[in-house]
Amino acid sequence: MMEFLVWAGAALSLMGLAGLIWSIVKVISARRKTQDDAELRAAVQAVLPWNMGALFVSVLGLMLVILGIFLG
């Protein structure tokens, strides 16, 4: 059972990492496309909730990994 927690946590952490990479790519592409500061600010504000959600998923995954190791 504890091995399942470790693997599930690792999968969640990888999903969170993928979300963080996606948000970085979106902001970099928006930065290259636009010259207007207001448009760039709007693009970053649109990506910010996804970035925070991905960070939260990654933290939850790491907590599951630690919990699985601690209990196992």
Image: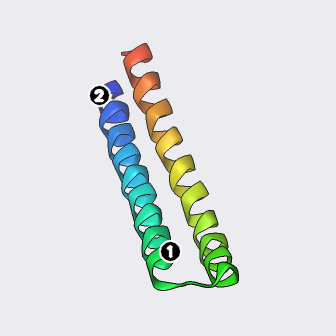
Query: Horizontal placement of 22 versus 59: left or right?
Result: left
Q: Nearer the viewer, residue 16 or 4?
A: 16
In 3D space, how far apart are the residues under numbered discs 1 and 2 (Cα atoms)?
42 Å
**Mark 2 nearby-residue class (10 Å; few <14, some 14–19, many ≥20):** few
Q: Nearer the viewer, residue 15 or 48?
A: 48
Q: Position of residue 35 (x, y in %)?
A: 56, 84
Query: Horizontal placement of 58 versus 36: left or right?
Result: left
**Mark 1 nearby-residue class (10 Å; few <14, some 14–19, many ≥20):** some
Q: Position of residue 8 (x, y in %)?
A: 35, 41
Nearer the camera: disc 1 or disc 2: 1
Residue furthest out toward the front:
35
Residue at 57%, 48% (x, y): give it. 56
Which quarter of the rendered picture does the C terminus lie within?
A: top left
Q: Amino acid at mark 1?
A: Arg
Q: Amino acid at mark 2?
A: Glu
Using the image, determine if residue 67 lies above or below residue 7.
Answer: above
Q: Secondary structure at mark 1?
A: helix
Residue at 51%, 49% (x, y): give it. 57
Say the numbered circle drawn on residue 58. none
Q: Quadrant of residue 43?
A: bottom right
Q: Position of residue 51 (x, y in %)?
A: 55, 59
> How does the figure colour the protein chain or chains?
rainbow
Q: Quadrant of residue 64?
A: top left
Q: Which residue is mark 2?
A: 3
Using the image, determine if residue 51 lies above or below residue 46.
Answer: above
Using the image, determine if residue 63 lies above or below residue 36.
Answer: above
Using the image, determine if residue 18 lies above or below residue 65.
Answer: below
Of the image marks 1 and 2, the number of the one nearer the N terminus: 2
Which quarter of the rendered picture does the N terminus lie within?
A: top left
Q: Nearer the viewer, residue 26 or 60?
A: 26
Say the numbered circle drawn on residue 31. 1
Residue at 52%, 40% (x, y): give it. 60
